[in-house]
Amino acid sequence: MTNPTPLHNRHRTVLPDWLALYYKHPIELTHGEGRHVWDADGNRYLDFFGGILTTMTAHALPEVTKAVSEQAGRIIHSSTLYLNRPMIELAERVAALSGIPDARVFFTTSGTEANDTALLLATTYRRSNQILAMRNSYHGRSFSTVSITGNRGWSPTSLSPLQTHYVQGAVRTRGPLAHLDDAAFTAAAARDLEDVLGQARGGVAALIAEPIQGVGGFTSPPDGLYGAFREVLDRHGILWISDEVQTGWGRTGEHFWGWQAHAQNGPPDILTFAKGIGNGMSIGGVVARAEVMNCLDSNSISTFGGSPVTMAAGVANLAYLLEHDLQGNARRVGGLLLERLRGIAATVPAVREVRGRGLMAGLELTKPGTDEADPDAAAAVLEAAREGGLLLGKGGGYNTSVLRIAPPLSLTVAEAEEGAEILEQALRSI
């Protein structure tokens, strides 16, 4: 058996203390195939977290591997100062899929950078540094994005280039609105938005919101809430930024984008994406209507955003996803998995709630009989699941007590059942 301690010691010697690692004895993943990965000891795991929702289709997908290899054999890098065929091809496809009219696309290397760009566009377009954000939110780790993150566990400073106003409504089953039915919840959250705007000085630039909060523990509002918000925003000329870094590309099963569950008043003004589109390659991006995207009055480039190699991967990965209807698979297999998880939860007192849609599920753990978060239980289940051959994620605005499940969208029914069985044993072990 390989001793991970020397590598872990090297990690701790040269990398920051705040760079988180899972597990008491961290593992080194060496390779993957399909929905499985292997560690340095040869242990095989069913991957239910996909590199934080990034391995969207499958590990070592031949179509993506081939596209990357062939492009790398031609040219690896050129920057955005030159015409770039793979970048233009992917931009055309993303623009057409976005639902935003007269769309323009700008590629970045991460979701953080995508949200950073969206904030730059919105504040420039509106000539305001005021941003509306949702409580319990997460939008990245840059200086501007941590300042709009409504989760203190992921926001290391109160310093900010922006003035942020936090709005109610993103968490359906906690907080002062939780007792209301969906219609009353939405109406109360919209009134809260109006109240917050009454306290803001001058024009607000934008509302940024995740349709389903990722790091926040896969929480979400009732369908239609952001559509109702849009009515308020439009009266004030405020832009809507939909952060689709985790919800995009059909992961929710019911919709290709998370914003489509709130579409009664049209698409967002700005959409950000990342993670799954590259299937592990570093791709992020922003989609906005031309009027907003073109509002910058200075030159700009992206040295690594739109790299020929990553764009070739994105083109191949998106084609595979569409041709194999992985959104439909997420709906079918994800529905079966959620039903199975709810059945398990009904017999495990530590599980407060199972939530999510498609292949995006969260299990919130609390001390039995209470609403008190139990991060120790979540950590114990994470360890027990790994011992059983299953990799999960963690999250949640309430002391990281939510188990996050987001496998590749090609997950089979048999693999979903296998993962649920391992997770059930892990839950019962605590």
Image: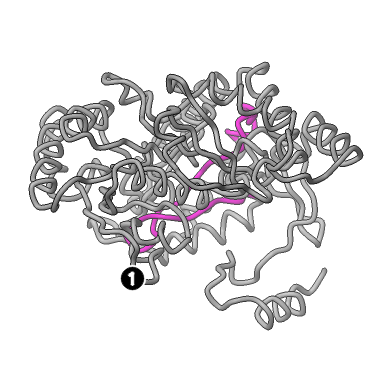
Left or right of 389: which side holds 368?
Answer: left
Q: Is residue 226 left or right of residue 241?
A: left
Q: Which of 216 and 130 lies nearest the eye of the viewer?
A: 130
Instruction: Describe residue 135's horizontal placement relative to residue 425 as left or right.
Output: left
- The figure's colour scheme reads one colour
92 in magenta: no
Question: Which of the two residues, 336 or 204, is positioned nearer the viewer here?
Answer: 204
In the rendered image, residue 398 lying in the magenta stretch gets the answer: yes
In the foreground, 265 or 296 = 296
Residue sitting at x 11%, y 32%: 187
Q: Amino acid at mark 1?
A: Leu
Query: Residue 193 appears in which quarter of the rendering?
Result: top left
Q: Magenta segment range?
A: 390-417
**Horizontal arrangement in the rendering, residue 83 relative to residue 405 (left or right):** right
Residue indicated by mark 1:
159
**Residue 378 percent coordinates (x, y):** 44, 59
Q: Residue at x 26, y 32 (%)?
A: 226
Few, some or many residues within 10 Å of mark 1 (<14, 14–19, 20+):
few
Q: Quadrant of the C terminus?
A: bottom left
**Residue 262, above or below 108:** above
Furthest-right residue in this view: 73
Callout 1 secondary element: loop
Marker count (numbered): 1
Residue 184, image x, y percentages: 10, 31
